[in-house]
Amino acid sequence: MLEQLVKALAELEEDRVLEIVRQELDCGTEPLSILQACQRGMTEVGSRFESNEYFVSDLMMSGEIFKQVGVLLEEGLKSASQVSSGTVVIGTVAGDIHDIGKDIVVNMLKSANLDVTDLGVDVPPARFVTALQETNASVLGMSGLLTLAFDSMKETVVAIEEAGLRGRVHIMIGGGPVNGDVCEVVGADSWGADAQAAVRLAKTWLDVGAQT
Ligand code: B12
């Protein structure tokens, strides 16, 4: 059934996607597995866009469908405890407006009982710096799906250094094209391939007593 979900999302069959997601949830399938299948569907949408089979309107349609899936999965991805164990500042970097993955990360971090300051999309370096100063957060997450986002990430790291905050802020990056090489070039501390990785990194850093 999850393979059908991947296909339905790739085909932009909104009603079918939501129907399968509901059925999977009713059958007790882990919300995370459903999420991963949807991400594979989105990757296929991206490939079709690259080969000119799909247009920007189709990307937008896939985004709308994915957001509705997110609403259905939200409850299942939540955890029980309500006590906050730290603060994370996060945003999609300057020049990039993709926020579906970032929003999933935000929801997963919140579900893991972390306070999250979400700066939204197209966030300039100075805005990240101000938010880190205002919240005194010790973890920063930057999301970006465009290749040009790498430059913005790097500029943000430099701005954080120049503000004298680098020593107390752990920086993680993520988004479709991000990998270890990008992480090194950008000067971040680590990177994550999915929202679970973001939670793991944030919790590790906060648990080891990163200064807040
Ligand atoms: C939907 C979509 C759009 C929607 C976005 C809607 C929205 N509200 O976000 C719209 C239509 C607006 C859009 C616009 C554009 N897009 Co677009 N888009 C996509 C698409 C199909 C899916 C992205 C997505 O949501 N994926 C699903 C989410 C869940 O995955 P994710 O973001 O990677 O997030 C997960 C992980 O990466 C991780 N993660 C994410 N952030 C973070 C942060 C941290 C800290 C950590 C640890 C982890 C983490 O966790 C998430 C959940 O597991 C991708 C194709 C693809 N393969 O990704 C193209 C894609 C990203 N887009 C692309 C392009 C070119 C564009 C446009 C330039 C098109 C145009 N000509 O206008 C514009 C750019 C506008 C801009 N300035 O940003 C290209 C980028 C190519 C490149 N190398 O730069 C892609 C790859 C398509 C392609 N194959 O060509 N797009």
Image (tube, rainbow, N blue to C red):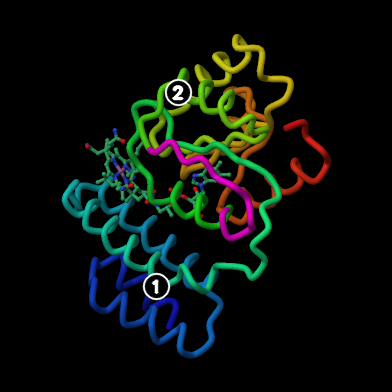
**Residue drawn at (45%, 84%) of the image:** 24
Read off the residue under disc 2: 127
Examine the structure image and report whether residue 1 is included in the region drawn in magenta: no
Tell me which amino acid carries mark 2.
Arg
Disc nearer the start of the sequence (1/2): 1
Secondary structure under the numbered disc 2 in the rendered image: helix
* Quarter of the image where the C terminus is located: top right
Q: Residue 147 bears which disc, if any?
A: none
Q: Residue farthest to the right?
A: 208
Q: Residue farthest to the top?
A: 162
Examine the structure image and report whether residue 118 is included in the region drawn in magenta: yes
Q: Residue 72 bears which disc, if any?
A: 1
Q: Which residues are magenta?
A: 110-120
**Residue drawn at (54%, 68%) of the image:** 77
**Residue drawn at (57%, 20%) of the image:** 157
Quadrant assignment, res 144: top left
